[in-house]
């Protein structure tokens, strides 16, 4: 029953750690089997290459990037070394000079680019071929061949055996963040429920997931499914939404006085709950590969401006500034709409594979998350 899972992004995401171990094991085993069958000399270089390319890179884009750079650097470095050693009658010092020139050029050209690893492999391959000037060229060529073999096996196994795409990981991390933001915002709008969950822990989890998303950017770019500008915009909007929700969570309105003041704003609580539900629905649509289709009623500050002048607790502490609290809610609405628009404009975000398989996974709800107005303390 493994075959239907080959194109199941959520299955690959859910078991990504185990599947990465499987891919590395298969790649090493396959490489070793080829070496045993054909008895290539200096075979350890093939095993090392497969392991280096795959070991800490579970994503297709990352392995393609690192493997491609390794292949390019190895090929160019070996060719440079062969050229300078095949010149008849060349003194060792001249060969060493040409080798140093090649190392200097490769280091200088790649120093400020994303191809630093290619530059490193160029230098390593060049030194392997040149050696101390007295090395048998056939040894260097066999090492070059084995590096290419191991790297190619690593790339092939990563791309073909239950491939884990960084873009899919980004999708599910984003959906989890949206769900958590919706939960935090709903907690804030439901007054006394703030004591029922650890808001600091949830905020920390959102931050951790965004750091993980940041680390996926190079791999995602290599997969060519999202542009760098789109990734940066998605991350920026998440950070700003999180900051806005944190400010809302720190407002001192979760007392009877503050609650009654908010409750007196006609229609305002309904708008808050509608926005919380919209964030939960957006998470559902992102996670299950749906088309992004969400509308939310705008927050009208002018409508409530006269109702809030200032509010104080019994101890005289201000609950919120005259317009600050309303502005924070509208800002969260604005950022949410901007994210919805951004995601809706990404052509490859909807996924038929995810839609077909969504109901099979127990961790993916068959309906969007609903955030209810009912709270345990104050009944609106």
Image: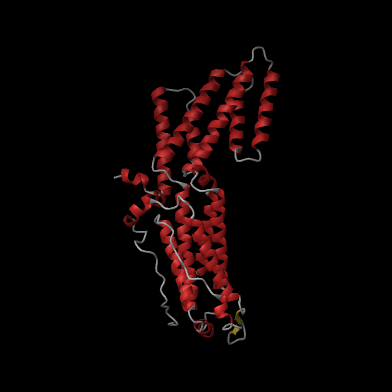
Q: Nearer the viewer, residue 168 or 352?
A: 352
Extreme residue in the top direction = 89
* Residue shown at the point (47%, 57%) measured from the top left: 344
Q: Nearer the viewer, residue 180 or 355?
A: 355
- Residue 293 visible: yes
Horizontal and vertical percent position of residue 175: 45, 59
In this rendering, is residue 52 above or below 258? above
Horizontal and vertical percent position of residue 202: 50, 65
Horizontal and vertical percent position of residue 74: 56, 29
Q: How many marks?
A: 0
Image quadrant containing the C terminus: bottom left
Image quadrant containing the N terminus: top left
In this rendering, is residue 83 above or below 296? above
Extreme residue in the left direction = 1
Left-right relation of 300 to 25:
right
Extreme residue in the bottom direction = 314
Left-right relation of 128 to 343:
right
Horizontal and vertical percent position of residue 304: 55, 80
Q: Nearer the viewer, residue 181 or 314?
A: 181
In this rendering, is residue 103 above or below 139? below
* Residue shown at the point (61%, 38%) measured from the top left: 116
How is this picture coloured? secondary structure
- Residue 252 visible: no
């Amino acid at each position: 029953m493994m075959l239907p899972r080959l194109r199941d992004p959520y299955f690959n995401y859910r078991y990504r750690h185990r599947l990465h171990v499987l891919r590395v094991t298969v790649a090493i085993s396959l490489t070793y089997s080829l070496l045993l069958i054909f008895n290539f000399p200096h075979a350890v270089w093939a095993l090392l290459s497969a392991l280096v390319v795959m070991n800490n890179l579970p994503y297709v884009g990352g392995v393609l990037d690192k493997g491609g750079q390794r292949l390019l650097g190895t090929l160019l470095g070996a060719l440079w070394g062969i050229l300078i050693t095949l010149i008849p009658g060349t003194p060792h010092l001249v060969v060493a000079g040409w080798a140093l020139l090649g190392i200097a050029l490769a280091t200088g050209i790649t120093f400020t680019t994303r191809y630093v690893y290619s530059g490193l492999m160029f230098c390593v391959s060049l030194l392997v071929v040149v050696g101390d000037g007295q090395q048998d060229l056939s040894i260097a060529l066999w090492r070059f061949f084995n590096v290419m073999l191991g790297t190619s096996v690593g790339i092939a196994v990563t791309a073909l055996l239950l491939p884990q795409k960084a873009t899919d990981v980004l999708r599910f991390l984003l959906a989890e963040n949206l769900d958590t933001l919706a939960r935090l915002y709903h907690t804030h709008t439901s007054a006394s429920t703030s004591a029922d969950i650890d808001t600091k822990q949830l905020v920390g989890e959102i931050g951790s997931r965004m750091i993980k998303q940041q680390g996926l950017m190079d791999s995602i770019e290599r997969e060519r499914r999202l542009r760098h500008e789109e990734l940066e915009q998605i991350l920026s909007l998440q950070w700003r939404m999180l900051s806005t929700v944190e400010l809302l969570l720190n407002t001192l309105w979760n007392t009877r006085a503050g609650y009654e003041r908010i409750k007196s704003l006609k229609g305002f609580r309904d708008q808050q709950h509608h926005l919380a539900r919209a964030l939960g629905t957006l998470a559902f649509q992102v996670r299950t590969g749906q088309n992004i289709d969400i509308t939310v009623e705008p927050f009208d500050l002018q409508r409530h401006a006269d109702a809030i002048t200032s509010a104080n607790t019994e101890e005289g502490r201000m609950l919120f500034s005259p317009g600050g609290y309303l502005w924070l809610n509208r800002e969260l609405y604005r950022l949410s709409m901007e994210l919805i628009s951004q995601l809706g404009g990404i052509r490859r975000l909807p996924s038929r594979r995810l839609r077909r398989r969504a109901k099979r996974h127990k961790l993916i709800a068959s309906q969007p998350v609903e955030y209810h107005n009912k709270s345990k303390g104050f009944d609106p």
